[in-house]
């Protein structure tokens, strides 16, 4: 996705053409009229740029009427919604009963004059005697290199001898998956810029050449380290528990015979060998596929030939060895598995009968799979995305992984055929692509995994310790509810909220943003049920969610077919905020029920992602969500918000303003601190504001899971900044922004990380919490997570990360996720 070019002229459509279509839809009924409010395929002529088709139903204009006024309609894009100037538009609250007489207002009385609050007496400027902030030229760590730090922390989880074995294997799988995506998107983008000659110096002081060179060096070292962890540590230890990953040579004759039958009946029919010679050009190698490079000789002619054989992705990567199935009556025997390529290789003679197999080697290619949609030129965003998905399959190669036993001849052949350099080749011990270890994690071996945890129904939504959900609407009318997943159940809270809203005849409308979910999601099913029941249902669907584009297109069309008003967001911005608004008719009038979260409405990932959510009927939040949904589905450039910070308009400026307030309070001798919990922090403006806070003596605690472009503990720059990183069984995903505010603590939660894409190119929302207990709880969470009592990684002044698992006396430090599970299970509430 690219940011719209300010110089691009938006396409226009004559007003007469649009009015003809409006009149036709208006008289045809609601379903057709709804199309005009859906910024998707049905409304391409209104909401997207591109060639326009004349409306055959339009009333022809009288060419002699010189007084006819001509109007044009233009596409809206991100630039139209970043201006917060101008008058504030007061939105009416419709919570008052409609059938009551308006109250008689007393005659206005002059308001008593309040004494102006005395201006704080500021102490001396702490930066006056310090070097200028800009003089610290290395104050920003490169985004890509700090991401490598994060993936190294994932690898260190796999190296942790105290973790359960199958969990360690699972972290190896995550490491591989992370690195694949990183190369497909970030490294591919850098390499494309290098080819185009676009290599400016980045904020870190490095250019693209330097960054790619350092990524390559570190990635190869980490990949080799990963292979060692698997082959020399985890695999032998699994064998001690009778979980074996075997090679062909380690099987007995009976097992050979049975696997040969398996090959003939299950694998052989799926395989397609492809010859490579002057009449057969080198075939297209799909990204992330496993392949065998086979060198052959014709015994009659003596000529050598090359062939490529793709390992079928439709079959399990790890094949159970016959007689060693885990579901045998004797579980003590354990199980044994063999990689599918190790079954194919000894049977290559079945594929090349009459040829002599000289050598074969496994290899794997990574391609550029980042989508580039020129939205200003897209007649239909959905159709453009579908076309781009087809192109993705043919992106340039950016990495080649080969077995370290490969011959120089075959290696050179592959490098040249794929258009790569020698530096782009990763030579690794077999097996390649350790994502297959996910299969091991699926084995029914609870003794080798984390202890099982069952999420509980959140306090306020369940009866005592019962897991049975109560009436969500009644619970929300009683009080606001703070959700903390996966400790609090997603299914008995958010999912149940949507289900009850869909089934409740008093509910008139449901509006929801959907960034990532699944086609078989109960959330999607509930929205369809609501639409079919006649409710007004609006889904703001982000079809540009990376690597979920195809899935999102599929279930978005499913929603459209059911009558849901599907809106595909606005040009130039991804809709990333997590919002849900339900409008319900009650005796007192209409009431709005809201959910603002930090995570996607995805029931499966909600079991593994740590996230927060707020359920509330607060009028200010309800009006904010109403305004924001109107902004997303229509036009509202001057919408104002009460308890929300909304990107790209006010998230960065709102957070920086609060950091500056802490600086002023510190200079005035008041209590001041900043505490943040984010996934990533790379935005230079925000980082510089935190540096200024540190230089003013404001303590800053940051808990970051992934990317961190900030330096900590640098004298004169960041000696008051403490940065911690936590990884565990759950992926830390919640965003919390807490500010002391002279003792009147202010806390926000929401979808936005401190990255350029979140602050400038996405619609994000942070909501301010007002319940004192919630504020206290989340302040404790960030403070405690950053403390020395909790197991975490510490960012050092030299930019390295040091893992702290044991305290000064050798005791194991607290696992914050275990603490939160225990607190939720005991149902004692939170501090």
Image: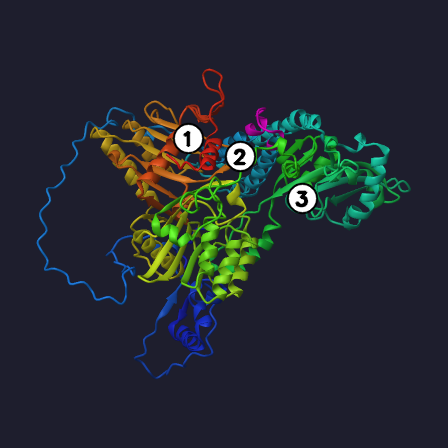
Residue holding disc 2: 729
Residue at horizontal 45%, vertical 77%?
Answer: 28
Ranked by sequence position, the earlier of labels 2 and 1 is 2
Q: Which element is circle 2 on?
A: loop
Residue 154, horizontal then vertical, whole percent: 54, 32
Residue at horizontal 55%, vertical 27%?
Answer: 156
Question: Which corner quadrant of the image does residue 626 belong to?
Answer: bottom left
Given residues 306 and 627, the one toward you in this image is 627
- How far apart are labels 2 and 1 at the CA level? 15 Å
Residue at horizontal 44%, vertical 23%?
Answer: 798
Q: Which element is circle 1 on?
A: helix
Residue holding disc 3: 289
Residue 391, horizontal then vertical, whole percent: 59, 53
- Left or right of 291? Residue 590 is left
Residue holding disc 1: 785
Does the segment drawn in magenta span residue 101?
no
Ranked by sequence position, the earlier of labels 3 and 2 is 3
The reply to whether residue 824 is visible in this rendering is yes
Ranked by sequence position, the earlier of labels 3 and 1 is 3
Quadrant for the C terminus, please: top left
Given residues 201 and 283, the one toward you in this image is 283
Which stretch is magenta? 156-167
Using a 10 Å C-alpha cutoff, classify the residue at mark 3 as few (fewer than 14 neighbours), some (14 to 19) or many (20 or more).
some
Given residues 43 and 405, the one toward you in this image is 43
Q: Is residue 442 above or below residue 5?
A: above
């Amino acid at each position: 996705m690219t940011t719209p070019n300010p110089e691009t002229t938006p396409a226009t459509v004559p007003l007469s053409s649009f009015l003809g279509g409006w009149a036709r839809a208006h008289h045809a009924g609601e379903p057709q009229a709804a199309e005009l409010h859906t910024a998707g395929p049905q409304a391409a002529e209104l909401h997207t740029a591109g060639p326009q088709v004349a409306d055959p139903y339009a009333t022809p204009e009288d060419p002699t009427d010189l007084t006819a006024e001509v109007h044009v309609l233009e596409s809206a894009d991100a630039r139209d919604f970043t201006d917060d100037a101008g008058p504030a538009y007061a939105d009416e609250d419709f919570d008052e009963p409609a059938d009551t007489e308006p109250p008689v207002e007393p005659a206005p009385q002059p308001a008593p004059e309040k004494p102006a609050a005395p201006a704080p007496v500021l102490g001396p400027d702490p930066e006056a005697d310090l070097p200028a902030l800009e003089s610290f030229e290395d104050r920003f760590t490169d985004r890509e290199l700090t991401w490598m730090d994060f993936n190294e922390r994932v690898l260190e989880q796999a190296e942790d001898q105290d973790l359960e074995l199958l969990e360690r294997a699972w972290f190896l799988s995550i490491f591989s998956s992370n690195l694949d995506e990183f190369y497909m998107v970030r490294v591919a983008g850098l390499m494309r810029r290098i080819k185009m000659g676009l290599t400016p110096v980045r904020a870190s002081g490095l250019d693209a050449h330097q960054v790619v060179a350092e990524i390559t060096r570190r990635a190869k070292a980490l990949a080799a380290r990963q292979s060692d962890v698997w082959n020399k540590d985890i695999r032998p230890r699994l064998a001690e528990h009778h979980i074996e990953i075997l090679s062909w040579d380690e099987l007995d004759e009976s097992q050979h015979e049975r696997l040969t039958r398996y090959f003939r009946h299950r694998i052989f029919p799926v395989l397609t060998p492809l010859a490579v010679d002057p009449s057969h050009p080198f075939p297209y190698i799909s990204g992330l596929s496993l392949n065998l490079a086979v060198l052959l000789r014709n015994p009659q002619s003596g000529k050598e030939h090359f062939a490529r054989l793709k390992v079928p992705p439709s079959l399990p990567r790890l094949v159970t060895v016959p007689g060693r199935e885990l579901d045998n009556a004797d579980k003590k025997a354990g199980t044994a598995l063999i990689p599918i390529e190790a079954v194919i290789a000894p049977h290559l003679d079945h594929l090349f009968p009459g040829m002599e197999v000289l050598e074969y080697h496994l290899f794997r290619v990574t391609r550029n799979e980042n989508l580039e949609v020129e939205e200003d030129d897209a007649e239909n965003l959905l159709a453009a995305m579908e076309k781009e998905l087809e192109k993705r399959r043919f992106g340039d190669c950016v990495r080649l992984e080969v077995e370290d036993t490969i011959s120089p001849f075959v290696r050179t052949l592959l490098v040249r055929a794929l258009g790569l350099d020698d530096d782009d080749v990763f030579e690794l011990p077999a097996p390649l692509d350790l994502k297959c270890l996910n299969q091991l994690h699926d084995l029914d071996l609870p003794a080798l995994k984390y202890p099982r945890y069952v999420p509980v129904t959140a306090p306020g939504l369940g009866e005592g310790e019962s897991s049975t959900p109560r009436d969500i609407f009644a619970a929300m009318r009683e009080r606001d509810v703070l959700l903390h997943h996966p400790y609090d159940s997603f299914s008995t809270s958010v999912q149940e909220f949507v289900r009850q809203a869909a089934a409740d005849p008093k509910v008139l409308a449901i509006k929801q943003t959907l960034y990532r979910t699944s086609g078989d999601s109960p959330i999607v099913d509930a929205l369809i049920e609501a639409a079919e029941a006649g409710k007004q249902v609006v889904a703001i669907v982000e079809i540009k969610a990376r690597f979920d584009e195809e899935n999102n297109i599929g279930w978005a069309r499913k929603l459209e077919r059911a009558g849901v008003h599907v809106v595909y967001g606005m040009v130039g911005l991804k809709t990333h905020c997590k919002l849900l608004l339900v409008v319900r008719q009650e005796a007192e009038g209409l009431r709005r029920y809201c959910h603002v979260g930090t995570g996607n409405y995805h029931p499966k990932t909600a079991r593994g992602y740590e996230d927060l959510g707020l359920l509330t009927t607060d009028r200010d939040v309800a009006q904010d969500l109403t305004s924001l949904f109107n902004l997303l589905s229509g036009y509202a450039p001057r919408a104002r918000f009460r308890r929300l910070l909304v990107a790209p308009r006010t998230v960065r400026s709102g957070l920086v303003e609060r950091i500056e307030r802490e600086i002023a309070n510190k200079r005035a001798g008041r209590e001041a601190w900043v505490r943040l919990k984010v996934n990533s922090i790379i935005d230079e403006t925000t980082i510089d504001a935190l540096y200024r806070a540190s230089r003013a003596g404001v303590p800053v605690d940051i808990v970051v899971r992934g990317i961190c472009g900030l330096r900590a503990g640098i004298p004169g720059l960041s000696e008051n900044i403490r940065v911690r990183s936590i990884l565990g069984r759950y992926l830390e995903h919640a965003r919390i922004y807490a500010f002391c505010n002279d003792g009147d603590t202010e806390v926000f939660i929401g979808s936005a990380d401190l990255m350029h894409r979140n602050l400038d190119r996405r619609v994000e929302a942070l909501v301010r919490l007002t319940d004192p207990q919630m504020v206290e709880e989340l302040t404790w969470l960030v403070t405690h997570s950053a403390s020395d009592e909790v197991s975490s990684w510490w960012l050092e002044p030299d930019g390295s990360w040091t893992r702290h698992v044991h305290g000064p006396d050798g005791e194991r430090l607290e696992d914050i996720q275990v603490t939160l599970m225990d607190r939720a299970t005991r149902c004692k509430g939170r501090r």
